């Protein structure tokens, strides 16, 4: 009984010493317990914690595949292939006096035209040409006096010049044209007119003179004879024209 009493007293003393020590030290556990009690009184009552909703994750968008229309290739035109033509060799047939014989098919026989024999021309002679017209006998009109200037040296192409009784006229040895009616007429070549015979002399056509009939008379200074006559044209007409005939061509 005395043991219990002594133990109780010892325990009470330890507690008292502990309280004294605790009160002497600032920020002790007692003050901490009091502060915690005050905070619990002032803190609002909190509802029990509710579970947080899990964040919703949106499903990834899957893009629909785009379908492209298939490309249709344009039809290709078929190329034409030329088929080589097979040619059959031609075979010429030769006629013989004896029995008929067929030539070989592999060889082509050419037929040559028969040559026509031509008459041999003697050496030193020219080929035959159309003979010039025969000389005509002409009786000059008017006097035999010299009425015109010289004609020798007139150009073979284009117009020359001569003076008859003080009047100027042109002399043409080739391609002379005149106005006849409503069209132009071109005289034939002088060589087709032929020569003329006056007295004992022979004269040859040398030039066309543009003089009228009244002035186409007499002789030139170099001995040519002026003669008025009808001349055929290239168009087929016949026109009166003055022609000079000279003793030389």
Image (cartoon, helix red, strand yellow):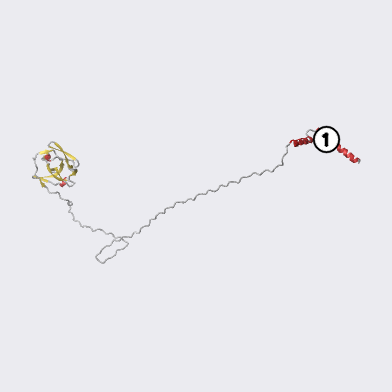
How many numbered circles does the render carry? Answer: 1
Q: Quadrant of residue 159?
A: top left
- The residue beneath circle 1 is 19
Q: Is residue 79 above or below residue 219?
A: below
Q: Position of residue 49 (x, y in %)?
A: 71, 42
Q: Quadrant of residue 25?
A: top right
Q: Is residue 114 above or below residue 235?
A: below
Left or right position of 76 against 143:
right
Left or right position of 12 against 217:
right
Residue at 86%, 37% (x, y): give it.
12
Q: Position of residue 116 (x, y in %)?
A: 21, 57
**Residue at the extreme bottom:** 99
Q: Is residue 128 above or below residue 142?
A: below
Out of 16 and 40, give the one closest to the viewer: 40
Q: Name the quarter where the N terminus is drawn.
A: top right
**Residue at the extreme right:** 2
Residue at 83%, 35% (x, y): give it.
19
Q: Quadrant of residue 249?
A: top left
Q: Position of residue 227 (x, y in %)?
A: 12, 43
Out of 222 and 231, give the one closest to the viewer: 231
Residue at 84%, 37% (x, y): give it.
15
Q: Position of residue 123 (x, y in %)?
A: 18, 53
Residue at 88%, 39% (x, y): give it.
8
Within 10 angstroms of label 1, few (less than 14), some, or many (20 or more) residues?
Answer: few
Under tag 1, what secondary structure? helix
């Amino acid at each position: 009984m005395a043991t219990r009493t002594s133990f109780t007293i010892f325990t009470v003393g330890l507690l008292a010493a502990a309280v004294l020590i605790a009160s002497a030290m600032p920020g002790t556990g007692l003050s901490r317990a009091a502060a915690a009690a005050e905070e619990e009184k002032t803190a609002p009552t909190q509802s029990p914690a509710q579970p947080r909703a899990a964040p919703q994750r949106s499903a990834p968008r899957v893009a629909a595949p785009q379908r492209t229309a298939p490309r249709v290739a344009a039809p290709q035109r078929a190329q034409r292939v030329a088929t080589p033509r097979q040619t059959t060799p031609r075979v010429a047939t030769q006629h013989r006096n004896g029995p008929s014989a067929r030539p070989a098919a592999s060889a082509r026989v050419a037929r040559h035209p028969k040559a026509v024999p031509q008459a041999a021309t003697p050496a030193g002679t020219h080929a035959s040409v159309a003979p010039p017209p025969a000389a005509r006998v002409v009786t000059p009109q008017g006097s035999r006096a010299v009425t015109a200037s010289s004609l020798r040296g007139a150009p073979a192409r284009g117009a020359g010049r001569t003076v008859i009784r003080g009047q100027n006229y042109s002399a043409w040895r080739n391609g002379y044209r005149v106005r006849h009616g409503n069209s132009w007429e071109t005289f034939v070549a002088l060589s087709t007119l032929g020569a003329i015979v006056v007295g004992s002399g022979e004269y040859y056509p040398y030039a066309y003179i543009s003089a009228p009939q009244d002035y186409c008379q007499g002789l030139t200074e170099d001995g040519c004879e002026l003669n008025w006559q009808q001349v055929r044209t290239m168009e087929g007409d016949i026109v009166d024209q003055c022609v000079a005939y000279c003793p030389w061509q």
